[in-house]
Image (cartoon, helix red, strand yellow):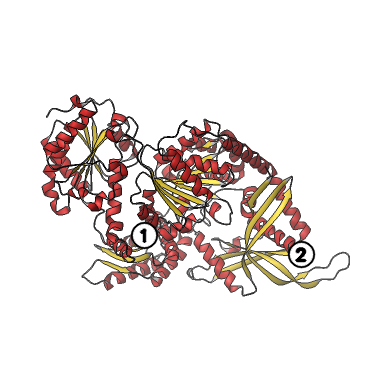
Amino acid sequence: MENHITLPIRRLVEFLLRGGSIDNRFGGMESAQEGARIHRRIQKAAGDAYEAEVTLTLDREVGGIRYTLEGRADGVFTEETEIPGDSAGTEKQTVPLLYVDEIKTVAQPLEMIDENFNRTHWAQAMCYACILCIQRDLPSMGVRLTYARREPGRGRRGPEELKHFRRRLSREELESFLDGLLERYRLWGEAQLEWIRLRNESIQALPFPYGAYRAGQREMAAAVYRTIAASGRLFTQAPTGIGKTISALFPAVKSMGEQLSDRLFYLTAKTITRQAAEQAFDGMRGKGLRMRSVTLTAKEKICFLGAERACNPDACPYAKGHYDRVNDALRDLLDSSDAMGREVIEGCARRHTVCPFELALDATLWADGIICDYNYAFDPQVYLRRFFQEVNERYVFLVDEAHNLVDRSREMYSAGVAKSAFRGVLKALPKKDTLRRPLNRVIRALNERAAAMGEETDFYTQEESQTEFNCLLEDFIDDCGPWLELNAGTDGAEEALQLFFDALHYLKIAELYDECFVTTTERKGRDVVVKQLCLDPSHALDGCMKRARATALFSATLTPLDYFASVLGGNDNTRTQALPSPYDRDRLCLLMADRISTRYRDREESVEPIADGIRRTVGSHKGNYIVYFPSYQYMQTVAGRFEEKYPDVDILVQRGGMDEQEREAFLARFDEGNDHTLVGFCVLGGIYAEGIDLKGSRLIGTIVVGVGLPQLSEEQNLLKTYYSRDGRSGYDYAYTFPGMNKVLQAAGRVIRGEEDRGVVVLMDDRFTTAQYRRLYPEHWRDFRVVRSDEALERELKEFWDRQGQADEGLPR
């Protein structure tokens, strides 16, 4: 294998030259988008002769390794510069000198910043200057550092305070500096090349880790591999039992061994699917795979300080001196395990007294696979900029449980602010506090918006972005940032910090605002909420997926596929795939109770027949069951009536706000060893309706009450209107499809393994209509309609008779 490494310059200098502590007290309030905005303003003000955002690339061999160095200079310009005389008698002269400009935004007052403020800033600029010097065959170059700080009280529209530092360096000095950095990096580079060689050899020899493929696995694996090879996108509906995790990961790993990709991201919405990915990697390692994987855990969960988290050296021993020790910790971590999960990372962080979250982020740069939440690839606030800015790598995105990405992406690209939050901060401040003025201006604007709505409506929609209101939020952020730095720990500071971040997020979304958004103003009692609502996240997701060579999205419930492809960023190079269930259809009894209407107007009358239907179902065979309802109120009403009418049946009712321990205790009640029937009452679309894996006799039946329609609301109706514009069925996009997805997820809790058997009863007359039957997966085609309790009981008895276990039912 060729000794070649592609290396971003910023990554090189920060890795080698960083030092000191993590400290978010200075600079922590500045946002990335604000820094970019200031950059653009400075560049524009520099005039036409100023070259902005100059892309630079250089091949350089040092120590037997050929590096492709990549970066982007903020600016390149020519300036008349005085060159001093020398000992050979050359007189002082003024000549035009080419400069590289590196712009850095800071929160500190500029008088606190001197020429030696940050050595990585000089190093980055000097590397860019070296590349230009070589490419343009110049004897010397100028390097300028420009530090910019927004002038307090002048808002985000400027002007900025600027401070410049200049150096003139010869080509020999610049080349010597660059080569010195690459020599310092050599041991890491050699280790990286050796690792890639070892990894690729192991991948090429890797067999499918579980022997023979299950039904559907080979088809899915082949489709994923072809998608990667074709740089495309794939949407796969893979029913439970196919083994979608390994069916996606195995071909993605194989593609890396054939140098079709450089790194893969396994993106999930829940902890349980992250664990499945870890287990799949471990299964391949058991067959000889050498591949590094990192699992990212949210900062608030992995932080050793817990709720008292404060990222500064005075409050946290792991932040103090972190950058002085982190490279040693990283070396230890990489040597200790190929599987860098939470426990491994925490253990290494404790040994070296470094921040576990930052250590995990650093480890991703040396990992082949990254297991993480959707946010790290798709969220405009927290996506991993170290991979997706100024980096030219071939990534593969594997998006698990992709049905969850619809709501998650709409949340990521929506943002709102409430008057109550601004008033809450205002009340905590002294009367003469400087922050009161910008708070009052936003509150006054929100009151004016509410007054303009009149008395006839509490909800108002505007298609255009609200520029004047956004400017008020900009002014609030401008004043709030310095205020937070001076008032940490005082009354109102915690609430002000949260409001600061909410406003920042709002303004980030304002930058993305286009025809896929609307702005809503809603009056809620005395509160007023303004929200930028993302109706269609497909454009934003498409942009995110363009950062990857290929993306495969998969779930057991992507029905209908064309709906998910259109909402989740499908493009002209998108393929869809629907796989059949690998399980014996005779092991599932699917019944439609079409005599019951769960429409809102009929709910009071439906309570009694639903309670009776539940009793008939669970009375057919002893075991564990879950009944799913479209709302807490409906669930509690039916559960109360059921308990009153059938006290001989043990029930368990989901409560709102259950903590992790309570959730685990709830699921533990569904035990294979139960000697009686247990009926759980749960909410459709809730924590027990998907992502739980109750195999075997831990769950032998589910009853789904209602078609799962989202609650009627102004926002859902906006979705309906938006998707109706171009001929699509807006009602289906806003209500039918999301509701049916919840139903399919809940029903999918029953058959989790090849030996499982069980029943699914759908209680709502709409399930038998063509509108819903068209959405049934292929393995649901054998459903039976029951129109009476007696028919329900008869069908269930016949099913359990066929299973040879009919003698264990409850007494009737």
The secondary structure type at the circle numbered 2 is loop
Q: Which residue is mark 1?
A: 425
Please identify the quarter of the rendering in which residue 804 is found. top left
Which amino acid type is shown beneath numbered disc 2? Leu
Label 1 vs label 2, nearer the camera: 2
For mark 1, does the 10 Å Cα neighbourhood hold few (<14), some (14 to 19), or many (20 or more) residues? many
Q: Is the C terminus in the top left, top right, bottom left or bottom right quadrant?
A: top left
Where in the figure is residue 312, as x and y percent of width and height? 52, 49
Residue at image location 57% in from the left, 72% down from the top: 44
Task: Decide: is 492 above or below 272.
Answer: below
Q: How many marks?
A: 2
Q: Is the N terminus in the top left, top right, bottom left or bottom right quadrant?
A: top right
Nearest to the observer: residue 588 or residue 349: 588
Q: Which residue is mark 2?
A: 138
**Circles 1, 2 touching at the beta carbon (< 8 Å):** no
Which amino acid type is shown beneath numbered disc 1? Val
Classify residue 501 as left or right of residue 685. Answer: right
Nearest to the observer: residue 454 or residue 405: 405
